[in-house]
Image (cartoon, rainbow, N blue to C red):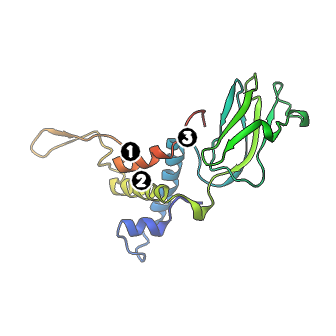
Amino acid sequence: MAYCTLDEVKAYLDIKSTETDKDDLIDTLIKSSQAFINEYCNRTFEKEALIEYHDGGSNKIFLNCYPIQTSPAIQVWDSWDRTYASGDLVDSNDYFIDYDQGIITFDYGVGGSPGAVKVSYTGGYKSYQLPTPIIQACIELVARKFKEGPSGGLGVPSRALPGGGNVTFVIDDLLPQTRIVLDSYRKVGGSR
């Protein structure tokens, strides 16, 4: 699933739908902007079935893809030797799941070795449920990169002025409003 569509970007840039000479470039920019959003937010937004391995030593696990779907049910193993046998399956009464934030809080500290905690779950948004601010952020990123073009603009550190002298640009991949939106969706704690 793309976080925004070609038609949405073209409408934002005021490009007619019949003008198709830049469609391949826009499609490429959509993919790279989506990857940037995932990296910046330290998470993914697409719904998918996942298996993750986390280090123990805490009573909290921060999952990489949320919101967490209720079906199929999440499963957690706590296996110091990383065999993840049926006897290592943690009883669901021994932890609380924050489905919206992707945080599992255990009644006790789990694991004692790297990768000791295995979590099987489905997380992320269905394509029609993707938050509108994420869609808009993706559109804005694509539009900004499209307008910069290969020769730069906002991403160029400085340029010579006619008649001498230089002008310096601030290099920043995000507009302030885009940064605010993405900051509100960044994953807290843990690593991706």
Asked if residue 141 is positioned above or below residue 189 in the image, the reply reads below
Amino acid type, label 3: Lys
Residue at image point 55% right, 37% down? 188
- Secondary structure beneath dot 1 equals loop
Q: Which residue in the protein does label 1 denote? A: 173
Neighbour class for label 1 at 10 Å: few (<14), some, many (≥20)? some
Residue at image point 57% right, 33% down? 189
Asked if residue 153 is positioned above or below residue 93 in the image, the reply reads below
Q: Position of residue 36 (x, y in %)?
A: 49, 46
For the residues bearing labels 3 and 1, Cβ distance under 8 angstroms: no
Q: Give me the disc on residue 187.
A: 3
Q: How far separated are the C-alphas under marks 1 and 2? A: 8 Å
Nearest to the observer: residue 118 or residue 103: 103
Q: Quadrant of the rendered structure where residue 169 is?
A: top left
Nearest to the observer: residue 116 or residue 35: 116
Q: Position of residue 6 (x, y in %)?
A: 48, 66
